[in-house]
Amino acid sequence: MILPTKYIPASDSVLGRAGAILPLRESNPTVSELWHSYRTIRTDESFDSFVEALTLLFMLGVVSIDTGVLQWRV
């Protein structure tokens, strides 16, 4: 689910996972480097759930990609 509900905690929603990615924006990593950084803080998440959260950030205009490197807009 994109948003938390009565049965889905905020940390398990796409919005919550996207929020967990935001503190990792200190540099301009590749998707692979960001995935490895994300796995250090959320060891139980799958790559699919990471991609869903990253896609949400793309749709919101928070991040873009330029020649394989993520560019943070916020």
Image (cartoon, grey):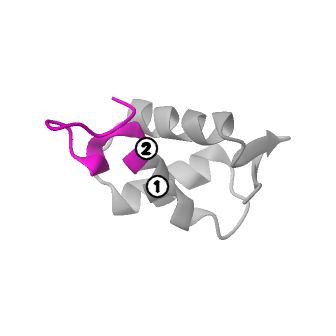
Q: Residue at x 39, y 32 (%)?
A: 2
Q: Quadrant of the N terminus?
A: top left
Q: Badge 2 local density, few (<14 within 10 Å), some, or many (20+)?
A: some
| Proximity of marks 1 and 2: CB atoms separated by less than 8 Å | yes
Is residue 24 visible in the rendered image? The answer is yes
Above or below 39: residue 2? above
Which portion, as a residue range, is magenta?
A: 1-16
The residue that label 1 is drawn on is 19
Residue 68 visible in rendering: no
* Residue drawn 40% across the image and 34% down it: 49
Residue farthest toward the bottom in the current orientation of the protein: 26
Q: Main secondary structure of the magenta part?
A: loop
Q: Is residue 44 left or right of residue 17?
A: left
Q: Amino acid at mark 2?
A: Leu
> Residue 15 got which mark?
2
Query: Percent from the top left, x then y, of residue 30?
Result: 68, 49
In the image, 25 versus 59, the foreground residue is 59
